Image (spheres, grey):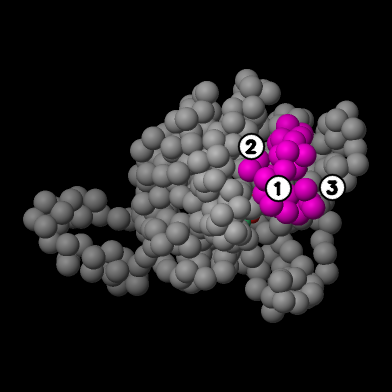
Amino acid sequence: MSKFKFSVGPWNVHTGADSYGPETRQPIDLETKFAKFAELGFSAIQFHDDDAVPDMNNMTEEEIKEYARGVKKLLDKYGLAAEFVAPRLWMDPHTKDGGFMSTRKEDREFALWRAYRSIDIAKELGTDLIVLWLAREGTLCAESKSPVWATKQLVDAINKMLEYDPKIRVCIEPKPNEPIDRSICGTMGHVMAISAATIDPKRVGGNLESAHAILAGLDPANEIGFALAFDKLFTVHLNDQNGIRYDQDKSFGVENLRQAFNQVKVLAENNYGSKGEYVGLDVKAMRTTSDEDSYEHLKNSLAIFRALEDKVARYDYDYANKLIADRKFEQLEMYTMNLLMGIQ
Ligand code: XUL
Ligand code: MN
């Protein structure tokens, strides 16, 4: 029995379309996904603002809240909570050049409107957490905006969100690139600096995604640990990634099992989850996956996480600490590898 609670976003089950080809699977409606997520053992759902309220751009503020109340009822029906709401600041023509740091004022206003509406939706769904994945916040043309101005725009936008609602918490999901070329907030270190510069640092933290850390050339477990050291790991997006290339969102642990083990280990050692945090997945099925196997990558990720949790529970800390005291790191490494290979 896992001591963690798990969350997932509806986009984790998708049609298989990519930049180079059309859909390979049929779309699945939200309620069917909720039912299946609950059956698989998830406790909470992650939302983009328009996952919850699809046509929100054409709705009034009241209509948006009313629609969100309907989604809350659907969550309740399946015993699910909402973990967070994230404004989708990359699809609309207004976000062509980014949201909070777009070079056009009307686009920046649109981004803030979506951020405020995300807060409204979050309140209706019963969560205080807003995630910012800053997809297009940076440059495609390096000279198109000042990085100093852009950084201050981000701090300003977060301050406005903190002022809009005194209870909400803002959680930045850093990523160094893709779809943007040069991002403004690429790692957990950037997130900590932005947090410290806001009007209420306690309410601004991070969401570490394994693949994003790897894209930045960093170790996901160390990025998780860095945020934990400042009490600012508000959630995680666990997955896997084969090196520095396009964002792959592979099932957790399938690419680098030792790296995955160390992510579970640092979470377990630091009682992640004791303040209600979820272990969130952000994984994609392969394009070749059939309709009937649409949820296999989620099952696999949960199974691998739980198996690694079991390995952490069996980790012999007395033995490891003795090896550390004697600086026998070759033996420590082999002890870990043997544990993972099932040799002990
Ligand atoms: C993109 C990514 C997003 C966010 C949510 O790389 O990870 O799915 O997690 O907007
Ligand atoms: Mn993510």
Amino acid carrying label 1: it is Leu
Occupied quadrant, residue 177: bottom right
Occupied quadrant, residue 61: top right
Q: Does the magenta stretch include residue 104?
A: yes
Horizontal and vertical percent position of residue 154? 58, 38
| Residue that extends furthest to the left in the rendered view of this protein | 326
Is label 3 in contact with label 2 (beta carbons under 8 Å)?
no
Residue depth check, mark 3 versus mark 1: number of the one nearer the observer: 1
Amino acid carrying label 2: it is Ile
Q: Distance between the residues labelled 3 and 2?
A: 17 Å
Q: Distance between the residues labelled 3 and 1?
A: 14 Å
Q: What stretch is highlighted in magenta?
A: 90-117
Q: Distance between the residues labelled 1 and 2?
A: 13 Å
Left-right relation of 179 to 332: right
Of 167 and 75, nearer the camera is 167
Task: Name the residue: 25% across, 54% down.
Answer: 316
Task: Name the residue: 60% across, 59% down.
Answer: 141
Horizontal and vertical percent position of residue 22? 79, 75
**Where does ligand 1 appear, by image quarter?**
bottom right
Task: Name the residue: 58% across, 51% down.
Answer: 138
Amino acid carrying label 3: it is Pro
Q: Name the residue under label 1.
A: 89
Whichever of callouts 3 and 2 sits on the residue coming sooner in the sequence is 3
Determine the secondary structure under disc 1. loop
Determine the secondary structure under disc 3. loop
Left-right relation of 251 to 226: right
Task: Name the residue: 82% across, 40% down.
Answer: 71
Q: How crowded is mark 1: few (under 14 residues within 10 Å), some or many (20 or more)?
A: many
Residue 274 shows which numbered tag?
A: none
Occupied quadrant, residue 261: bottom left
Q: Mark 3 points at which residue?
A: 54
